[in-house]
Image: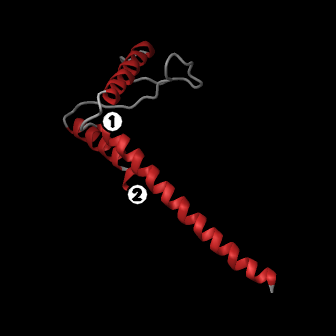
Amino acid sequence: MPSFRWGPVQRIRTAITRLRSSNIDVSLTWVPSHGKAARVPLDFPAGLTEDRARLLNERADAAAGRALASGLGDSPVADYVRSVAEATVWSTSALSHALAVQERYLAFLSGFAAA
């Protein structure tokens, strides 16, 4: 399996594990983006309101935008952008090879039709 699929996920898991081992409670909560209404009931950890969660989400989006605008540097966002680029190259190559196999197989089959 290409590394671009699990690299960011593994870094997040590692960071959460380190925080939890330091007795820092960590939970991930989905928040609808940019004022969109939730289609399912939202379940926030104790002490976190929907308004606060949306504010944190907006701040995270803004920080990600600033990181992208600043050229990224060496950051998790930069790693993600690079992994997307790697995924694009890998996917394009895989599809190209699959197409080549399909063309050869069709040529093989057409030999039976002509016989």
* Image-based side of 25 in relation to 58, left or right: left
Q: Residue 35: horizontal and vertical position, in percent?
A: 51, 16
Q: Label 1 belongs to which residue? A: 77
Residue located farthest toward the bottom when viewing the structure as drawn: 115
Label 2: element kind: loop
Q: Residue 3: horizontal and vertical position, in percent?
A: 37, 55
Amino acid tagged 2: Pro
Label 1: element kind: helix
Depth check: give the residue in front, 95 or 38: 95
Gap in angstroms between the C-alphas marked 2 and 1: 19 Å
Quadrant of the drawing holding the N terminus: bottom left
Quadrant of the drawing holding the C terminus: bottom right
**Vertically, is 70 above or below 103?**
above
The quarter of the picture where residue 53 lies is: top left
Q: Residue at x 34, y 49 (%)?
A: 7
The quarter of the picture where residue 46 lies is: top left
**Vertically, is 35 above or below 72?**
above
Depth check: give the residue in front, 91 or 27: 91
Q: Residue 94: horizontal and vertical position, in percent?
A: 51, 61
Dot label at residue 2: 2
